[in-house]
Image: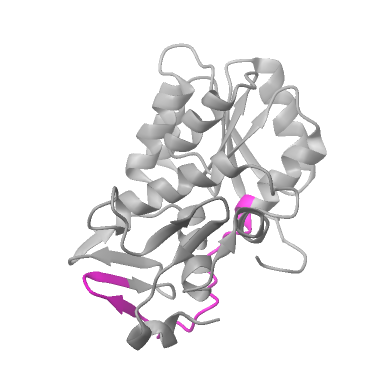
Amino acid sequence: MRNGPISVQGSRILVVDDEPQMRRVLRSTLSALGFVVFDAESGEAAMERVREEKFDLILLDINLPGLSGLETCRAIRARSDVSIIMLTVRDRSLDKIEALDAGADGYVTKPFDVNELLARIRATLRRAPVSMLSKTDVLEVDDLQISFGERRVSVDGRIARLTPTELELLEYFVTHSNVVLPHDQILQAVWGPDYGNEVEYLRVFVNQLRKKIEPDPAKPRYLLTEPWLGYRFHLPAQQSGAGKS
């Protein structure tokens, strides 16, 4: 977790919502705080925007006509690692898990408190390419190679594309390798002090990481579950030096 004030001046945010009033409110509120805000009224319009311009974060309504929010999220994630926060009127756990599984970095339920939304935005934008490890540190374990300085992970020579949240989560595991990390400690370290009870939330991201870095995600070799406690990143003794904090 990074400490200190977070500068948002100039960060580019795309608001995707089919309700004109919601777009106006978010554009006005975020612009007043120093963000550069753009908007789109549909998933199709959002995809066109993403193809033409670069954004730091996307606020994406889950309930869009035509191309749904989930479909839009998957399509964006297939081509970009831009941070995505889903906006939804639904409050069912399954809907939130579907949003995360589609590639979202987080979610906020409507109606939401503006301060809550801003906290989520800042926490997500905080996942900038700043590494706790030296830019020259490269961790190699069997066919897995991780360079946090270059923000690059490869498995058997193939680049594994990680989102900013997945990369920060992996970095936290690696820098605390061979240590059992409780669920709440991981959530608060990566997502912020307002988190701690969202065990299912964390489980989704761990499963995503396993699909990208494990030879067999069903039988993980590196990212191990400690039943009822949390997770542990297993690093062989001869390579553990690169993974210590």
**Image quadrant occupied by the N terminus:** bottom right
Please state the horizontal and vertical placement of residue 85, each as a whole percent of the image.
Answer: 58, 38
The answer to whether residue 57 is above or below residue 182 is above
For residue 81, say whether it is visible. no
Please state the horizontal and vertical placement of residue 92, each as a whole percent of the image.
Answer: 60, 21
For residue 240, say whether it is visible. yes
Please state the horizontal and vertical placement of residue 102, each as a whole percent of the image.
Answer: 42, 34
**Image quadrant occupied by the C terminus:** bottom right
Taking the spot 37% from the left edge, 38% from the top edge, the residue there is: 51
| 73 sits left or right of 114 in the view | left
State the predominant SS element of the stretch in magenta. loop
Taking the spot 51% from the left edge, 75% from the top edge, the residue there is: 175
Outermost residue on the top side: it is 65
Please check the rendered image and state whether residue 185 is part of the magenta-colored stretch, yes or no.
Answer: no
| 34 sits left or right of 86 in the view | right
- What residue span does the magenta drawing correspond to? 124-145
The answer to whether residue 104 is above or below residue 68 is below
Look at the image and name its color scheme. Answer: one colour
Please state the horizontal and vertical placement of residue 134, each as a whole percent of the image.
Answer: 48, 84
Taking the spot 55% from the left edge, 71% from the top edge, the residue there is: 130
Taking the spot 31% from the left edge, 59% from the top edge, the residue there is: 213
Asked which quadrant contains residue 182, the reply is: bottom right
Q: Nearer the viewer, residue 175 or 135?
A: 175
Asked which quadrant contains residue 48, the reply is: top left
The answer to whether residue 78 is above or below residue 154 is above
| 45 sits left or right of 158 in the view | right
